[in-house]
Amino acid sequence: MKKLITIILTLALALSCAALTLAEDAGLKLSAPTGAPALAVAAMAAEHPENYTFLDASTIGAEFQKNEADFIIAPINAGAKLFRAGKSTYQLAAVVTWGNLFFASQKADFSADSLNGADLTLFGENTINASVVLAVLEAKGIVPASVNYLAGAAETQAELLSNPDAIVVTADPAVTAAKVKNANVKTLSVEEMLKEALDMDGYAQAGLFVRAETAAEKPEEVAAYLEAVREAAGRAETDVAAVAEAAVTLEILPNAKVAEAAIPGCHIRYEEAAAVKAEIEKTAAFDLSQYGGEVPADEFYFQAK
């Protein structure tokens, strides 16, 4: 039995190495926003940085319409909306992040009870992240006094650090960086509250998209690349230090201390999109307008031929 297990593990490692080699040799290009989503491929990108482009999140929509990158990591709702509108041929191959949101405050007695009747500052009005937060509050029976919005997690992080009475929603890695700067910062995981209230194991946040033309012209290379991404994303759980080092080298995250502490809270997990369609549709149901008015059609999901 021991010998059989050794043989199986050796074969699995050989297949994994073969997939990575084929993916690297193909020279396929990937674009991703800096921050949490890019961590899914950091271990790969550090080996061949010339094949990876890390962008400001606000430019990802334009990246789809350029139709140049073989793969794009992006918010799933953004890709779904463009696909439905006929402005993108990219199909969703995998979900790679499952939520990185936190309520945060410097208040000494900060807890879930603190959210009731409080003035809350969220980021990204009319985005799926905000919709998930509002759904969690409703499901938990929490009624804030007011909900205000800032542009992004960096802005709510700044409010958190500058105002000791503020209660904000921010995201990893920004919230971990805030804790490093100020030991008074306390957090509540939105994803844990989602689990408690709605029995969801996170929400389908960012995904790996594959360009239709690339999938049609290079099916073997695409299959190998997806397997390599699966392996790279898995390292965010099994080898956090290495992924943190890669993220700093690539300037995805600012420093190794923050990166290593933040990676677990980014919930990096590779799941084939077609296999988690139900979870994607549950996320879409929080705000269908973010997906073009309906849950994504079957043809939105990539499946290897």
Image: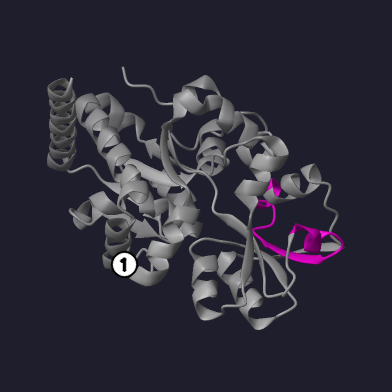
* Residue at figure coordinates x 55%, y 23% from the top left: 297
Of helix, strand and loop, which one carries label 1?
A: helix
Say which quarter of the image contains residue 119. Answer: bottom right
* Residue at figure coordinates x 26%, y 31% from the top left: 222
Horizontal side of 38 relative to 276 (left or right) equals left
- Residue lying at the far front of the rendered structure: 1
Give the answer, above or below, for where 229 lies relative to 168: above
Question: Magenta region: which residues?
Answer: 112-132
Say which quarter of the image contains residue 138. Answer: top right
Q: 247 and 184: which one is in front?
A: 184
Q: Residues within 10 Å of mark 1 (few under 14, many from 20)?
A: some
Image quadrant holding the C terminus, namely: top left
Residue 68 visible to the viewer: no
Whole-percent x and y of residue 52? 27, 53
Q: 126 and 232: which one is in front?
A: 232
Horizontal side of 93 relative to 163 (left or right) equals left
Horizontal side of 106 relative to 13 (left or right) equals right
Whole-percent x and y of residue 220? 20, 26
- Residue lying at the far top of the rendered structure: 305
* Residue at figure coordinates x 65%, y 82% from the top left: 162
Give the answer, above or below, for where 197 lies relative to 188: above
Q: Which residue is mark 1?
A: 248
